[in-house]
Image (spheres, rainbow, N blue to C red):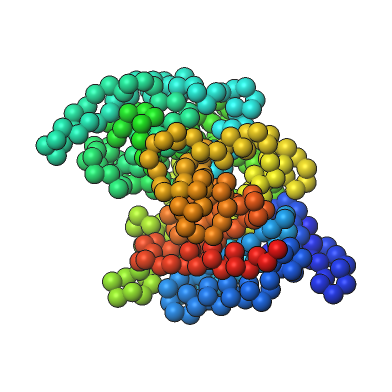
Amino acid sequence: MKRWKHFTTVAAATGVAATLAFGTFADEWTRVVPDDVGMSSDRLQRLTDVMQAYIDDGDIAGMVVLVARDGKVPYEKAFGYRDLESKSPMQEDTIFRIASQTKAIVTTGIMMLMEEGKILVTDPVGNYLPEFMHTKVAVPNGSGGYDVVPADRPITIRDLLTHTSGIPYGAWQNDLTADAWNAAGFPGWYFANKDQPIREVVRKMADLPMNAQPGTKWIYGYNLDILGAVVEVVSGETLDKFLKERIFDPLGMVDTQFYLPQNEADRLATVYDRSDDGTLTRSSDEGAMGTQGQYIIGQGPNVTFSGGAGLLSTAHDYSVFLEMLLNGGKTMSGEQLLSPTTVDLMTTDHLDGIPFRQGAGFGYGFQIATDQGALGYPGAEGEFRWGGAYHSTYWVDPVNKLVVTAFTQFGPTGGLDDQNKLRNLIYQAIVK
């Protein structure tokens, strides 16, 4: 059964609204027929048909897609299976590992602390985590190795927010310092199996060589995990408690957490990888993309709160969080979690010429569309977006008042074009 609080269904023929009570759900949301928000029902059927084809063809086990416009939901659909082996159907309230979509939530926590006057984004991280006051950097020596030199300046909170600190994702996608990070116990982004609090985990990073001088290069890495530790030090609370009290509870995000109670385990989607013959294979618990049991309380250490990739959530919960940002930091029930100026700051390009991606910059936690022609796909300048390692994606388009969340649990994508088609099929359905 869905965990809704106030989910209002608008009857197309009569215009009469009926409120359905089904337990507890994230914030307040209104479900409408697409035409009520300027979208074509017939054209949205194209989206349904194409996404269903990915399921029927065995490319993806299952997914949930939610589209919100003007603060209402004209489209929400679950496709395929939560678990192929048991033939458990995907549900709209299925819980997913959202991986790097955790970053935007922890970024919001950091901005809350800034608004309270407890930190400045220009502060050195070492003000709060002293071991980061003096770091070192690996400089290629032209012979396949590197020399280690002191960092030119301390890493700041802003460097971490924009992924310009020089800190990599351990040995993952790291051609320069992979051996050093791997030897220190950081083979990749995955933290759910660690047996130490995040403050102790990131402490070990400070003495490792970074891959660039602070503020000089965009490098995707452990930045938000470090900021998670900053949240704990500054707030005096563990990251899970801080996020629950300050973000999840006000938004009614009842299904967003780091570790799942045993009695909710059957709502967690299974992760699948693609085998050599192209078929979907259940990921192993030990695999870098597997972790089937690590997110269940009692089936792992369950003590490390990864601010960069650790949360579980539903499409509903995450969309409500994004809607708050679209609304200038205000919840649908009227509580101001962030000021509009802070949201503007988060969704502005901060790279100042640092190379990133054609047509896009990077803000605090998000890729920002800066040149739609250069990007070459439907959308609008000012859109902010990101995704997760399990092939989930989201974006917020302030021009078209659009929030899109698409969740699945899939490892290596093998060149799937579903996310691009998802985007095209949503925008072609906007008719006014």
Q: Position of residue 122 (x, y in %)?
A: 50, 23
Is residue 180 something one can see in this rendering? Answer: yes
Residue drawn at (32%, 70%), measured in percent from left and top?
A: 275
Q: Which image quadrant: the N terminus? A: bottom right
Residue drawn at (47%, 19%), measured in percent from left and top?
A: 127
Foreground: 280 or 363? 363
Give the side of residue 355 with respect to residue 176, left or right: right
Q: Position of residue 162 (x, y in %)?
A: 46, 36
> Residue 288 is drawn in which quadrant?
bottom left
Residue drawn at (72%, 54%), measured in percent from left and top?
A: 71
> Residue 113 is drawn in which quadrant?
top right
Give above or below for 232 relative to 172: above
Give the side of residue 141 with respect to residue 20, left or right: left
Is residue 93 something one can see in this rendering? Answer: no
Q: Which image quadrant: the C terminus? A: bottom right
Foreground: 135 or 252? 135
Give the side of residue 223 with respect to residue 261, left or right: left
Q: Position of residue 430 (x, y in %)?
A: 65, 65
Residue drawn at (78%, 46%), measured in percent from left and top?
A: 333
Q: Quick one: which residue is furthest to the left in this view?
A: 143
Give above or below for 364 relative to 23: above
Foreground: 207 or 192? 207
> Residue 74 is drawn in which quadrant?
bottom right
Q: Position of residue 92 (x, y in %)?
A: 62, 66
